[in-house]
Amino acid sequence: MKALSRVLPALLWLAAPGPAPAQDARLTVGGSSGLLTLPDASTLQRGTFAGGLAMDNRDRDPLGLDLLDASLTLTAGLASKVEAYAQGVVSRVVSVPELPPMPPPPLDLIVAPGATAPPRPRYAIYPPTPYVNKRGTARFDDWVPGDLTVGVKARLSEGARARPALALAGELKVPLTRSETDLMSGAGTGGWDGALRAIAQWGRDPLLTASARYTRVGAPARGDRDITIDAQGRAAAVDLDLDLPDRLEVGLGARRSLGSRVAAVLETSAAFAIGSRTPTVDESWPLDVLVGMQARLGRARLTVGVRYHGHALPSGERRVSPVAGMIDLTSVPDAELVSYLESVGAGASLPLLRSRSQRILAARNTGPLPAGARVLPDEYGIRSEHQVGVVMTLMWVFE
């Protein structure tokens, strides 16, 4: 909340009267008309189209993730008070600072005879990219696709004095890939999401806007599996779904013109997990503060901003791992995996192991470890680093 208290005076300054407005310099990273990432209640005129490129860089806890989305965006005015928009993430880069000390989903947990499985939670995740780990790619030119978001925004009423203008938007997010390799690189959840957003706007220039979006998160692509070996050497598998929470995102923003073609913009936004979910370690909600500029240059519309992630977990703090002492077998070659599991009495689990899963073993006697195996540490450290990111859009408007 300290970050929000610092932002409020700046929002009030932006709301004070300024020079002539920067006309039509308002297209968000998400594709709709608005500020930096938050929409306002306006819509493009009928027959007007805007398309271009967007970049969104953000840091997220608790794993110290650095996410970069490169997107193609399109907005079209359909009627006097209705616009449609779309954003497709053509390259999503997710950088992970280290091999996760608690392997994320999809997790195959093998329990050898005499051992016990630790209860959930067993790992930390960032729900929009739950499968990301150091074993994927983090190269922009590998072109890992993300998701396609399509939406429609309708202006419901015009504002007057203290009464705000109101708008409503509906969105559908579709995964562009369900490839196991892409998911572990951070492509997304592999599921379909639906969202509804309410928007209130006071004034035009200066402008104040508030919005709330509720996202119903669909079923992700993969869950976990527990494989237990009994004393007679028989294996039984239990599949555990990965339940991701819905999200409530709220935001406040302001824009003030600095001239006929340039405007200053300030936003603050937060996202909260809502409803049931698979329990995870170190659950955290992000609070972002963004400051930037919008400019109108002929048909071009340029938006540039800096994002600060202001609700970081205590970086460097050491905590006890829920899977301490277990054996991570994910990187063990198949031939060595077969012989090792048979040596610890867990060979019956082999037919039940899934493709491209994270694999850990709970066993009383582990013996010499095969190449590629590692003992999961007793403790892990919180990673909250490099909390500054950049957002940018470059659009062209055609009437």
Image (spheres, rainbow, N blue to C red):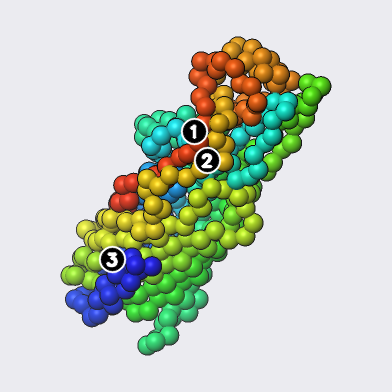
Amino acid type at circle 2 is Ser
Q: Nearer the viewer, mark 1 or mark 3?
A: 1
The vertical placement of 143 against 393, above or below, is above
Q: Mark 2 sits on what residue?
A: 321
**Which residue is depicted at the point 55% across and 31% down?**
325
Q: Mark 1 sits on what residue?
A: 377
| Callout 3: SS | strand
Q: Mark 3 sits on what residue?
A: 265
In space, the residues marked 2 and 3 are separated at their CA atoms by: 42 Å
Are the residues flagged by discs 2 and 1 in contact, CB closer than 8 Å?
Answer: yes
The vertical placement of 196 against 388, above or below, is below
**Which residue is depicted at the point 37% across and 79% down?**
202
Q: Nearer the viewer, residue 61 or 379?
A: 379
Q: Nearer the viewer, residue 42 or 325?
A: 325
| Callout 2: SS | loop
In space, the residues marked 1 and 3 are separated at their CA atoms by: 45 Å
Q: How many C-alpha atoms fall within 10 Å of the one at disc 1: few (<14), some, or many (≥20)? A: some
Where's residue 317, x and y in %? Answer: 40, 47
- Looking at the figure, which quarter contains the N terminus? bottom left
Between discs 2 and 3, the one toward the N terminus: 3
Are the residues flagged by discs 1 and 3 in contact, CB closer than 8 Å?
Answer: no
Where's residue 395, x and y in %? Answer: 32, 53
| Callout 1: SS | loop
Amino acid type at circle 3 is Val
Amino acid type at circle 1 is Pro
Q: Is residue 150 visible?
A: yes
**Which residue is depicted at the point 24% across and 76% down?**
13
Classify residue 28 as left or right of residue 107.
left
